[in-house]
Amino acid sequence: MAHLGARLTRIAPGSVHITLPNRPEVTQQHGYFHAGATSAIADSAGGYAAYTLFPDGTDVLTVEYKINLLSPAVGDHLEAVGTVLKAGRTLTVCRLEVFGVQDGRSKLVANGQQTLIRVDRT
Amino acid sequence: MAHLGARLTRIAPGSVHITLPNRPEVTQQHGYFHAGATSAIADSAGGYAAYTLFPDGTDVLTVEYKINLLSPAVGDHLEAVGTVLKAGRTLTVCRLEVFGVQDGRSKLVANGQQTLIRVDRT
Amino acid sequence: MAHLGARLTRIAPGSVHITLPNRPEVTQQHGYFHAGATSAIADSAGGYAAYTLFPDGTDVLTVEYKINLLSPAVGDHLEAVGTVLKAGRTLTVCRLEVFGVQDGRSKLVANGQQTLIRVDRT
Amino acid sequence: MAHLGARLTRIAPGSVHITLPNRPEVTQQHGYFHAGATSAIADSAGGYAAYTLFPDGTDVLTVEYKINLLSPAVGDHLEAVGTVLKAGRTLTVCRLEVFGVQDGRSKLVANGQQTLIRVDRT
């Protein structure tokens, strides 16, 4: 995440926001954010959202996710939102949303769903 | 759908509800609804939700969907909700939710995401 | 499954085939198999494939699956194949394939991927 | 891709391999490849595999993908394989596999499925 220039901008129980500023390293020729960057912050936002609900001494791993890239990811930054839909003892399921934000106006550019597993920290 | 005993209970632009009563044909030994029935009404709710936004003379096909079965699907009926997230000229993406409803109380039992394509009616 | 008229036709460690004959209950006006029936036998084939690798006293639950409906599901029967890709202590991941079979010739009509969890039988 | 250090190592009709060497920029504290890097090369391998079958003057966009992260992504390099399962006029569906390769031995570390759309180049 740090490598991409992303940062956590909101943390609440079961909900995390990650912001990724528009920089050459994460965009392609037309100024769109790379699908890889969009997906990476979505996956991370879900992982952190799940983690907010986990007890001490545990860790989170992504089991799988699915993401639809709905529109070109444009904007001065992207905002990924991970939201826990179901928190289980073993598995947690999150909704993933990524918004392209330009001049304070948001547009949904990607939407996904993710399954995570809680593991004991080693 | 008719074969399962399901019926459309709410139709609005980009949003459709389908209700499936608890019957022996769609439940298993413990009284839970079959995953197959849960998925089928979710897929149909999304398909109809997309279709509400399509022009005359077109039809809808499911390209793919992904569904998480979050909890045992119990209740006197299931309610599937399909909601259009992105309506494109060719492709439409829907959110799929299935609730188990018992005595008027709802619980999310499955959550999914679906891609549909608009085709000219033949 | 019995309700649909499906039956297990091949069982090996980590691999299960399910056959669904073409019958009015599982097809629509044009003679195509319903997407719901196609998905249901795919999900079941994966579930049984995982189950072949589980120890006594355990059971299998589908966590989630994703399926692409590639082509109209036509044929005198469908054949669903579930194949274990990764067998873990807690989670198992399967590949799901459904073929439309007409006069002994097979065509891939749906392809999917599924995550399952092993639970102690209650 | 170039930013990650990945390169195309095999191109055939409907099949593309991408290799990603183990470097600090794409790995985390334990030396595992980041899930984001694993997913990015899988998505790209599928995109290029679809593209090998497209006519001149067209381009490829990822509609959606789903990926299971099966095992820790370790090795001296990762190899992503994209394989076209169904090539349609509008939509193409690919299988995505990522192997961790250590001293010439391969292990499947991620498996996915992807839908792509062909668009006219603008």
Image (cartoon, coloured by chain):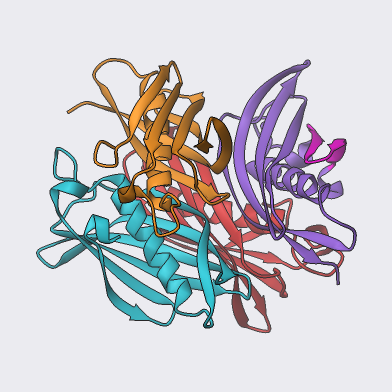
Chain colours: A cyan, B red, C purple, D orange
* Majority secondary structure in the magenta region: strand
C2 on left or right of B97:
right
A75 falls in the magenta region: no
User: Which residue sits at x=57%, y=50%?
Assistant: D71
Q: Where residue C16 appears, x then y in whole percent? A: 80, 38
Q: Is residue C97 above or below residue D15?
A: below
- Number of labels in the image equals 0
* Nearer the observer, B44 or D94: D94
Q: Which residues are magenta?
A: C5-22
- Residue C118: quadrant of the picture: bottom right
User: Which residue sits at x=47%, y=59%?
Assistant: A113
Q: Where residue B122 appears, x then y in whole percent? A: 49, 27
User: Which residue sits at x=77%, y=65%?
Assistant: C119
* Nearer the observer, A63 or C25: A63
User: Which residue sits at x=85%, y=41%?
Assistant: C5
- Residue C33: quadrant of the picture: top right
